[in-house]
Amino acid sequence: MIIRNIEVSQFRNYSSTTANFSPELNWIYGENGQGKTNLIEAVHYLCNLESFRTRKPSLLLQEKKHKAVLQAQVKRRQVQHNIRVNITKKGRHVFLDQSPSRRVSEYIFTFMALSFTPEDVNLFRNVPQERRKFFNRIIAFKDPAYLKNIQEYSKIIAQKNALLRRGNTEQIPLWNGMLASSAIHLMKHCDNFVEEINFHLNDIFRELSGRTEKLKLIYKPSLNPKDFQEKNFLQQLEKSLAKDLQYGFSVLGPHRDEYHLLMDGKKDRDFFSQGEFRITNLSLKMSINRLLCERHRFYPVLIFDDLFSELDDELVKHIFHYFFVLKNQIFVTSTSEPSQSLHGKIFHVVRGKLV
């Protein structure tokens, strides 16, 4: 996937800007507060229909403006698409090849950007819901059937929770049966995904960091898998009924699952330093990228915001070396020009303009 160009209008601190990008590396530099991150946020939004900084559309609009417009020409698997997204305080309107895109799921399964930002260090510090959301998006992109499984499961769990809040247990066994059946499909997807990621993760971690520790992604379901037998799931759900009634929601199921990173058996939030959170999260994102490239022949746009802060010179060398072998289109922000020659384009941002 390659973004050929972009037009940004009334977005953040950009009044009107046009840029033609390199299909390889795009280095965007400037002093702090000039709009480097705003530009790659626009790129990210066009690919994923969401910001990596905020969930409030109003914050994306230029001050005193009522609408922001993002437009781009995007090449995906030898087919060129024209994209336009109108953003207002109430939401967004998406146009793909001049026609309104009515189903968001179709759009987000067509385009994707993988981003690495300073906020990513919090992925394994934040609440489990944030991790589930992140991994669900990646798994669904790999296999759109997974999205249907999630939607089905969400309806089931909503119905069961409504009964629990009312203290109505008569129909709970019926919903437990549907929940167990749906949960099996979701958990198998998650388990297989983590296995695929771990096939690449440790090698990429060592390649990027030069370290020798073993890095592993762990999937920790709230239901004990036990060969994914529906009977086993039903028994666990039945035993949890008292707790379910106490809390007013189902305490077991994929909606309560967890993910962790382990480095030599030590869990992320308990032992990782700030720098280790950064390099392990970068390794995870690059493992996802490799999986999509090798298994699905899809090359997502890669976005790195302020990548080299808090990293020592040796680590920066390892990362640069890794970049040179990637086939993706890459966007990097920095406060300075690149220290070595690169294949791509350099953009200087000053007060919301490319100069």
Image (cartoon, helix red, strand yellow):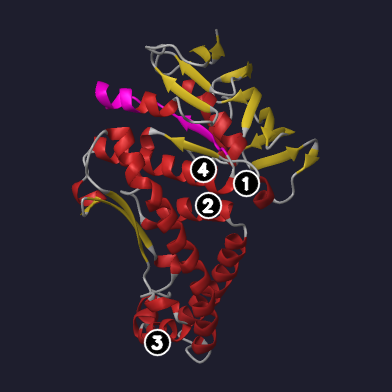
Where 187 falls versus 170 (above or below)? Answer: above
Q: Which residue is mark 1?
A: 108
Q: Position of residue 48 (x, y in %)?
A: 58, 41
Q: Position of residue 261 (x, y in %)?
A: 30, 51
Q: Which residue is mark 2?
A: 137
- The N terminus sits in image quarter: top right
Residue 303 drawn in magenta = yes
Residue type at mark 1 is Ile
Q: Which residue is mark 3?
A: 235
Circle nearer the N terminus (1, 2): 1
Q: Which residue is mark 4?
A: 55
Disc 1 secondary structure class: helix
Disc 3 secondary structure class: helix
Disc 4 secondary structure class: loop
Nearest to the observer: residue 22 or residue 336? 22
Residue pictured at 62% horizontal, 62% vertical: 145
Nearest to the observer: residue 309 or residue 69? 309
Q: Is residue 211 left or right of residue 325?
A: left
Residue pictured at 41% horizontal, 34% vertical: 117
The residue range painted magenta reads 299-318
The reply to whether dot 3 and dot 2 touch (C-beta < 8 Å) is no
Q: Position of residue 137 (x, y in %)?
A: 53, 52
Circle nearer the N terminus (3, 1): 1
- Crowd rating for badge 3 (residues with CA inside 10 Å; few <14, some 14–19, many 20+): few
Circle nearer the N terminus (2, 4): 4
Residue type at mark 2 is Arg
Where 162 falls versus 347 (above or below)? Answer: below
Circle nearer the N terminus (3, 2): 2
